[in-house]
Amino acid sequence: MNKIAVLTSGGDAPGMNAAIRAVVRTGISAGLDVYGVRNGYDGLIRGQWGYLSRRDVGGILHTGGTFLGSARCEEFYTLEGRQRAIEQMNAQGIEALVVIGGNGSQTGSYELHKMGFPVVGVASTIDNDLVGTDITIGVDSAINVALEAIDRLKTTAASHGRAFLLETMGRKCGYVALMAGIAGGAEVVVIPEQEIPPEEVAREVRAAYDRGKSHALIVVAEGAKNNARRLDEHFAAHPDAIGYDLRVTILGHVQRGADPTASDRLLATRLGEGAVRALVDGQRGVLVGLRGNRVTTTPLEEVAGRQKVIDLELLELARIMAK
Ligand code: ATP
């Protein structure tokens, strides 16, 4: 094996740059030429890539986003699209591919693997919903952004005796909301994995009010049925239900743009190195992740199309702490 390529796919996550850097520098150390693909699978289909030197990946370790660009690519869902991508790589002499991305991206990489192309995935998404890893690149940074917002909101909420409702990212997965809620001391956490009716949310907040708390915080994941908009509507229709005056903050994409935390940089560096090592060792069709603080590989077959189940004991922990 002489030439490999690396791409970032799906939603960008802080630490993707650190992972690209690790792939490139480990690859070069192993005697490989490493090509960086622009804009995920879209660039793969169009043959948009360039050789990356050690210096090309300098100065990016501390930056969020992905300097290669990322994309969601409809064409890659089709057999023809994936065939075209393989033809492009064969024409360039690229013998293996490292895919840095989340659930959908690794389902795509498994499709490539099934077509016989050597591929290794690196677990990276702010959702932390990938099977085969305890933690994904980007989630720690996303939690820290949410936590900073919580801390600030709590300060102003306490000054005015208000309740704040903070909506975090997470279409199908409430991991960021839950962890930020625990770390930030939320009164209620609402996640898609275990829906709570608005009446119950109101009861919990009202109980905090009646206990004399100067402020209250509700953290809700965007994918929850009762998201920020719905809860706000419910509280507006029942003005006495929570006691406090309520303000709503939706974090949105602010969460993605963070500089990666030390933890994400370290994780990305370890997993990026692990991906190249796996390829050099002859492993194919695996996801590189972290389990029990060890870099591990899991067959993509076990990862593709599945979502990691959230530990609901953590939700119980959030409830106990809120009392
Ligand atoms: P995030 O977790 O941040 O949302 P993701 O990797 O899950 O990232 P998706 O939009 O789900 O993001 O997937 C990224 C891309 O992966 C898709 O646009 C598509 O090109 C490819 N992909 C996803 N699922 C499949 C599939 N079943 N077959 C082939 N390609 C796929």
Image: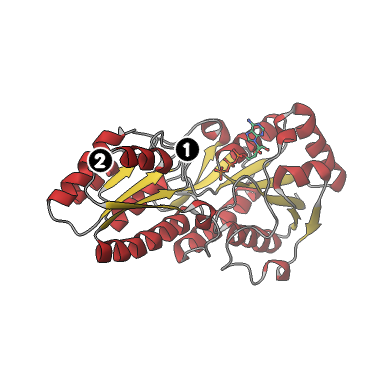
In the image, taking residue 77 as reference, residue 89 lies left or right, namely right
Residue 156 visible in this rendered orientation of the protein: yes
Residue at the spot of label 1? 131
Secondary structure type for disc 2: helix
Three-letter residue code for mark 1: Val
Classify mark 1: helix, strand or loop: loop
Q: How far apart are marks 1 and 2 (CA)?
A: 34 Å
Q: Position of residue 244 (x, y in %)?
A: 24, 51
Q: Which of marks 1 and 2 is nearer the N terminus?
A: 1
At label 2, the amino acid type is Ala
Count of number-bearing discs: 2
Q: Residue at position x 82%, y 44% from top? A: 46
User: Residue 187, relative to residue 159: is it above or below?
Assistant: above
Q: In this view of the protein, which residue sits in the foreground, 20 or 244?
A: 244
Q: Which residue is drawn at 66% across and 64% down?
A: 25
Residue projecting furthest to the top: 79
- Which is more toward the observer, 169 or 310? 169
Q: Residues within 10 Å of mark 2 (few under 14, many from 20)?
A: many
Up the image or down, 74 lies above or below 48; here it is above
Q: Mark 2 points at which residue?
A: 202
